[in-house]
Image: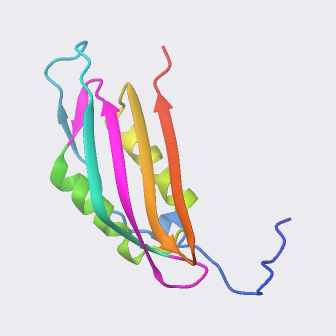
């Protein structure tokens, strides 16, 4: 059982099925077998803190090695922007982005980082990674 928070606040995150995230899209990678590394930096990420209902701001950094598909940039932008009205904790948002990215793109590897702005004198950086099994 999860203990209630010390401040007795209602800290419900947006349920996954209610997030209404824009779907990621892909295009074929024409050089499968040739490993390249693709890096994206998304400096305007925002979501809502479930604890305070204030916006959280972050830079999301994504690095991946494509397998047979690459993510289409406009869909990635719209997907990231669709978190603006989602109540979610830093730790959870990075895991959701990673899960969605892996499910859609099937990359060889992914490194994902959420570099969140200082809030209450605390700086948070969350990292997650994935490596395709052989």
- Residue 108 percent coordinates (x, y): 38, 24
| Dominant secondary-structure state across the stretch colored magenta | strand
x 38%, y 68%: residue: 83
| Residue 67 in which image quadrant | top left
Using the image, determine if residue 101 lies above or below residue 86.
above
Q: Residue furthest left?
A: 30
Q: Residue 14: image x %, image y %?
A: 53, 73
Q: Is residue 92 above or below residue 83?
A: above
Viewer-proximal residue, 120 or 3? 120
**Image point (57%, 74%), residue name:** 121
Relative to the observer, which residue lies in front, 26 or 58? 58
**Residue occupying the far front of the picture:** 121
Q: Is residue 89 visible?
A: no
What residue range appears in magenta? 49-71
Nearest the viewer among 95 and 20 is 95
The answer to whether 123 appears left or right of 82 in the picture is right
Residue 134 drawn at (x, y percent): 48, 13
Q: Is residue 63 magenta?
A: yes
Q: Is residue 78 visible?
A: yes
């Amino acid at each position: 059982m999860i203990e209630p928070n010390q401040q007795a606040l209602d800290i419900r995150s947006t349920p996954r099925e209610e997030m209404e995230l824009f779907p990621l899209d892909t295009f074929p990678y024409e050089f499968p077998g040739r490993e390249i590394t693709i890096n994206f930096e998304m400096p305007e990420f925002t979501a809502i803190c479930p604890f305070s209902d204030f916006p959280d701001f972050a830079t999301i950094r994504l690095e991946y090695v494509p397998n047979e598909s690459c993510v289409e940039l406009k869909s990635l932008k719209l997907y990231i922007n669709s978190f603006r009205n989602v109540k979610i904790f830093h730790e959870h948002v990075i895991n959701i982005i990673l899960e969605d990215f892996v499910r859609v793109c099937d990359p060889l590897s992914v490194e994902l980082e959420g570099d969140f702005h200082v809030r209450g004198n605390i700086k948070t950086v969350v990292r997650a990674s994935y490596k395709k099994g052989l």
